[in-house]
Each structure stands twice: as C-alpha cells, then as structure tokens.
Amino acid sequence: MSLHGLPVLYALFVWWFSTGLIIYLDNLPNVTVRWSMTGASVVLGAALWGLAASASDASVTGAYCAFTCGLLVWGWQEISFFTGALTGPRPLACPEGSRGWRRLGYAIQACLYHELAIIVSAAAVYAMTRGGANQVGFWTFMILWIMRQSSKLNVYLGVLNLNEEFLPEALAFLKSYLAKKPMNLLFPFSVTIATVFAAILVGKAIAPTATPFVASGFTFLATILILGILEHWFLVLPLPFAELWSWSLRGREAAAAVAPTEAAPSWTARLDRPCDKRELHDVLERVARGVFGQVDRVTGVARAGSGWVEFYVADGRSGMADVAICEPNEPRVVAFGRIVDQAGLQAAFAACSLPVAA
C-alpha cells in the first residue's frame, strides 16, 4: 500500500489542487500577475535546487521530492502562460478565414515564447538531474510536457469540450484558435499510444523485483500519465468534468469585485470609422508601454474591415480579438488612469482609422 497506494493518492491530490490553484491565480485581478509570477519564480528556483539535491537520492523520499519538484517546475510554465505573462510575439486572435498552414503559423506565433520557455526549462531540469540515479523529476516534467502538447494539438484540431470558461480575459484571443468538434483524427492515436506507455509504467511499478524506490517512482510516473490520458477523455466526453475545478473560478469573482470600485473613465471617444487592425495593435502596444501616461486600463470595440474587434490594455499587456457584434453597438474606446495623455490618445486612435473611400 505505501509503495503504490500512497503515491497514487499523493499524485491525485497534487494534480487536482495544483490545477485549481493555477486557474485561481490566473483569474485574479490583473494587478496580481506580477506577484503571482514573483512567487512562482521563487518556487521554480527552489524546485530546481530540489531536483539537483534529490538526483542522487534513490529512496522513496527521494522519489517524492523529485516528483514534487518536477511538477512545480511545470507549474511555472502553466502560470506564466495562463496569466498572459509569457505567450508569444502575436497575442492576437486568428484572422478570420485563416486555414491550414496559415492558421497553424498564427497559432505558433500566439504562444511561441511559452514553447521556448518550456524547452529552456526542460534543459534546466535535465542539467539538474543528469547522471543521477533518481530521474523521477525529469520524467515527470517530460510526461507533463508531452501530454500538454498532445492536448494543445487536440483542442486546435477540434474537441467537444474546450473549457473556454477557464481562460482569463488576457487570453481571450486564444479562443479563436480552438475548434469545437465531437473528436478529431489525432485523438485516438494520442490516447492509445499514451495508454500503452502507461501500461508499461504500471508493469515496472508492480514488478516483483522492483525496489521500494523503483516501485514508488514508477507509480508516480504511471499516475501522472494516466491523469494526462484522463484529461484527454475530458475533452471529448459529454460530462461536466469542469466541475472538478469550479472552486478555482473564485479568482474571477475577486477580479469582478474590484471592477465597481474603479474610478470614472479618464478618457473616452467614439471610433466612427473602421480601424486598421495592425495600426490599432501598435497603438495598444504603445499604451501598454506607458507612452500615453499612467493608463491603468483600456477597453474598446471597433469596426475592422467587414467585422468587429474587441481590444484591451491591462497590467502592461494588450490584446485584440475578432468578434461578431451587431451593428447597433457603438464603436468606442475607454481609458482609465491617473495621468492620461488625452490629446495623444485621441490622435493615436484617430490615426488608426482607415481612409473613407471616395
């Protein structure tokens, strides 16, 4: 029991609780992002140290330590991405009509920095554990990485349950890269291959010749892989699996509670003419960098081409997403802040307008 049951229960709890905690932190008010990232970075440093310290510890305690540290290193990736702190060079919605390789290219640009950060973290985990008898932490990280990549590909290709409700406002643009289908052709291969490897890991964990370290270590790895497979099934089965983490959305309630106390808008303007989306993106980036004073938040909606876009700036980040809005809605931009260059904002947004056809 202690070599198999306890690791399974421990992995189940850590997986459930850490997932919910990350969702909770990612949906807190934008002003908390820097604190979440600071805390996560401190934990990341401690986890890397723990991996190095446990690399030569081939004991049950060493397996617990390595598994936990590998999970914590992965947690930094999840927090940095889902807070919007580390996404990609193009944090924008997928342009309407994009298909095939073009759509894939836009999707890669939307999260490229995050993917590169994972590669760097994997290299760091490998460096901390290289040559050690305890590789549980390294393989924990690798399993989480592989299963997350598989999950991303599946939601990109199309699944039944996209769970968009867990995405914070800063990542609303990602919804345009998700496809809703009963299933896609990759899904059966994803779960079948993962299930075969899970069976191999279970076999190693329960082998009669397995030492206590090997039994507990492979139990951890098998459990986290099986949970990854379970998460894949969550994507396609018509059941309310999201209720497992409904408590984590209280962070969004906290963010909403802050909104009514905001000061009145510092500046607002109508956007009567359609906007050039590239020019609008550049203006939002300049606002986020502080070019127009101490602007805390900007929200707005504008016509762009034949459609509409919603846009925002919050906590030093900007985003824009294509939306379907009926004509009666009023195109407008609103800015909140203590010191706002109103004339500068007026000129910048006016410059985004497309010329009126003769």
Image: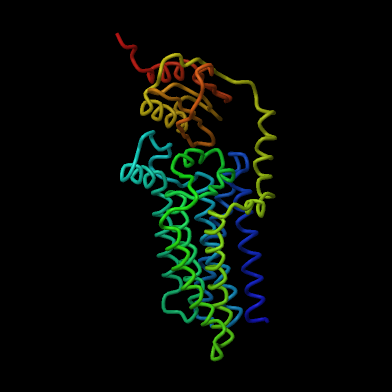
User: If the image is split into quadrants, where does the C terminus sit?
Assistant: top left
Residue that extends furthest to the top in the rendered view of this protein: 358
Q: Position of residue 195 (x, y in %)?
A: 49, 70
Q: Position of residue 86 (x, y in %)?
A: 46, 47
- In front of the other: 29 or 104: 104
| Scheme of colours in the image | rainbow
Query: Who's the residue at 65% across and 38% down the image?
Result: 255
Looking at the image, residue 107 lies above or below residue 73? above
90 versus 344 height, above or below:
below
Depth order, front residue of 144/243 = 243
Instruction: Determine whether, in the image, residue 21 is placed left or right of residue 275.
Output: right
Residue 256 x %, y %? 66, 35
Would residue 83 be found to the left or right of residue 112 on screen? right
Which residue: 48% across, 30% down? 323
Q: What x and y, as percent, mark residue 353?
A: 38, 18
* Residue plotted at (69% across, 45% down): 250
Q: Nearer the viewer, residue 137 or 97?
A: 97
